[in-house]
Image: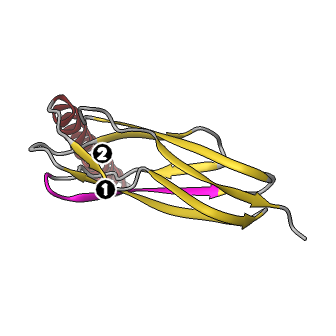
Amino acid sequence: MKKYLLLSLLSLAFVSCNSRHRDKIADDASAQKEKALKKTTTVQIIDSSYNFGKVTDGEKVEYNYRFKNTGTNPLVITEAHASCGCTVPQKPEKPIMPGEIGFIKVVFDSKARVGNAYKTVTVASNAKPEFPQLILTGDVVGKQ
């Protein structure tokens, strides 16, 4: 019985130590991100707008907006959000190093959006001047 108790205590100690180690890694990553945000950089927007033409109601449109870090510090994108819930941007999780090209993937769901579409994506980062709004336009036609 004592063996089981000792084994249980050792297992518990191991798991809690591992948990603290993961917390430290997460804290270190947060600290690095905050440090990088304090250092500004510049960015060149390669694609700031995209016209997807005509799609049928219910189709999904995907597009990758490209940008290049033209500064001397890592580019950290903290947020990317769209003007409506039908458009979902996905920002890069890792910093974009100087000279590298990054992407913000945007998926537009045209379901029940018949008519002209004009959607914007706002990006928050450590770039100065700030990112311009990314624009997605096109026409959604009803099903025949």
Q: Is residue 62 magenta?
A: no
Image location (x, y in percent) of residue 123 = 41, 39
Q: Residue at x 16, y 53 (%)?
A: 97
Please tell me which of labels 1 and 2 falls first in the chain. 1
Residue lying at the far left of the rendered structure = 72
Cα distance between the residues tagged 1 and 2 = 18 Å
Q: Nearer the viewer, residue 67 or 36?
A: 67
Q: The magenta stretch spans which residues? A: 98-108
Q: Label 2: how many residues lie within 10 Å, few (<14), some (14-19) or many (20+)?
A: few
Residue 101 magenta: yes
Identify which amino acid the numbered label 2 is placed on.
Ser
User: Where does residue 58 sit, x and y in percent of width and height?
Assistant: 76, 63
Q: Residue at x 81, y 53 (%)?
A: 112
In the rendered image, which residue does mark 1 sit on?
7
* Residue ID at (60%, 49%): 87
Q: Determine the secondary structure under disc 1.
A: helix
Check the picture and name the quadrant holding the N terminus.
bottom left
Q: Quadrant of the C terminus?
A: bottom right
Q: Residue furthest bottom?
A: 144
Against 32, is 67 above or below? below
x and y percent of residue 20 in the render? 25, 41
Considering depth in this image, is 93 or 129 the residue closer to the camera?
A: 129
Which mark lies nearer to you, 1 or 2?
A: 2
Q: Amino acid at mark 1?
A: Leu
- Quadrant of residue 119 within the rendered picture: top right
Q: Which residue is mark 2?
A: 19
Task: Answer with left or right where residue 57 lies relative to residue 99.
Answer: right
Seen at 17% across and 28% down, the residue is 38
Q: Position of residue 99 (x, y in %)?
A: 14, 56
Q: Quadrant of residue 32?
A: top left
Please tell me the numbered disc located at residue 34. Answer: none
